[in-house]
Amino acid sequence: MAVRLWLPHGIYHIMHIRRQIFVSGRVQGVFFRDSTRRLASELNLVGGVRNCRDGRVEVQVCGLEADVQTLIKWLKIGPKYAKVSTIKVIDLPVPSAEEPMQGLNSSYFEIWQTK
């Protein structure tokens, strides 16, 4: 069942799944975040990506299941100079109008500050 999520700018998006993904390996300093943002934007996904202080990259994404799975498949490989060793995918509750996705300030996929 699809859930409607109210986002800024008066736009409704139908969201099916939400995932938090941690990517380990050589994933910082290889344009991983920007490449992830570009692909997620092309797939019309909402969320963000950030570097973690422990060397991993964190991705939080919400969107249609097939599009989220496409992003996850790409995250297993990453951009040209990345060397992904592991990814951890965590199911998260789909946000609602009453409880929007924490940290989400827009209706697009963005690069967040390091955590």
Image (cartoon, rainbow, N blue to C red):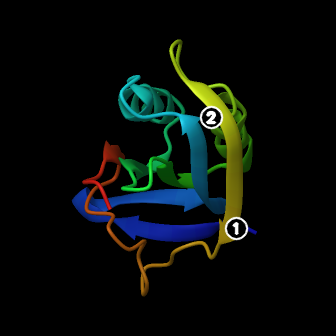
The residue that mark 1 highlights is 91
Q: Nearer the viewer, mark 1 or mark 2?
A: 2
The part of the image, by quadrant, that contains residue 37 is top left
Cβ atoms under marks 1 and 2 closer than 8 Å? no
Q: Secondary structure at mark 1?
A: strand
| Relative image position of residue 65 (x, y in whole percent) | 72, 49
Q: Residue at x 50, y 78 (%)?
A: 96
For badge 2, the amino acid type reads Leu
Give the side of residue 99 with respect to residue 82, left or right.
Answer: left
Say which quadrant the N terminus sits in: bottom right
Mark 1 vs 2, N-terminal side: 2
Q: Is residue 102 above or below residue 12?
A: below
Out of 101 and 26, give the one closest to the viewer.
26
Marks 1 and 2, Cα distance to the nearest angstrom? 16 Å
For badge 1, the amino acid type reads Asp
Q: Is residue 32 above or below residue 55?
A: above
